[in-house]
Image: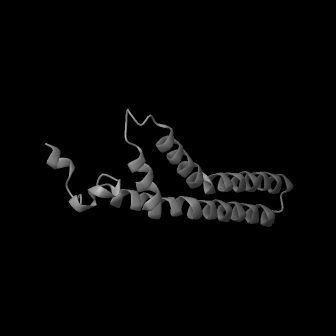
Amino acid sequence: MLDLFQIGVNVNAMDDGCGGLSSIVKIIKRGVFPIVQIGIPILLIVFGTIDLGKAVISSDDKEVKQAQSRLIKRCIYAVAIFFITTIVSIIMSLVATGADQDEANTTGWAECWENV
């Protein structure tokens, strides 16, 4: 039954602290996080700018003020999303160092997260 969970796991990579999950950790840390950290904030700011441009072209003061407030909110969201990866890395480090060493070995996970 255990062999079903080890499909695609490099047996030689079991010593890296990741327990054979180094490829998944690499995908998350080098693939998903940059998209979240860079791509989503850029899209939020671009869409906010487009909305503001449409409101300015329509020449309606009420729509311009609403578009400005939406753009400001989207910029705040973009900054918050940009720092998500930093917050996750800090939390991962705190969890790895804060756990009781007698109950679980989390230093391997910390090494995996930092070295991948």
> Which residue is found at the position 72% from the left and 64% from the top?
49
Left or right of residue 22: residue 38: right
Quarter-wise, where is residue 57 in the image? bottom right
- For the residue pair 5 and 39, the one nearer the viewer reads as 5
Image: 17 above or below 50: above
* Residue drawn at x 83%, y 53% as measured from the top left: 65
Quarter of the rendering occupied by the C terminus: bottom left
Residue 78, quarter of picture: bottom right
Residue 112, percent across and down? 40, 55
> With respect to residue 45, does 2 lie above or below?
above
Instruction: Say how many tags the image has.
Output: 0
Residue 105 horizontal/vertical position (percent): 37, 41
The quarter holding residue 59 reads bottom right
* Residue 87 percent across, percent down from the top left: 59, 49
Q: How is the image coloured?
A: one colour
User: What quarter of the picture does the N terminus occupy?
Assistant: top left
Horizontally, is 54 left or right of 1 in the view?
A: right
Residue at image x 77%, y 61%? Answer: 55
Residue farthest to the right, as pictured: 61
Question: How far across and how far down the image is residue 40, in percent?
Answer: 58, 60
Q: At 50% from the left edge and 47% from the top edge, which residue is drawn?
A: 92
Comparing 18 with 42, the one in front is 18
Instruction: Decide if residue 23 is on the left or right side of residue 42.
Output: left
Q: Nearer the viewer, residue 61 or 46?
A: 46
Q: Residue furthest front?
A: 102
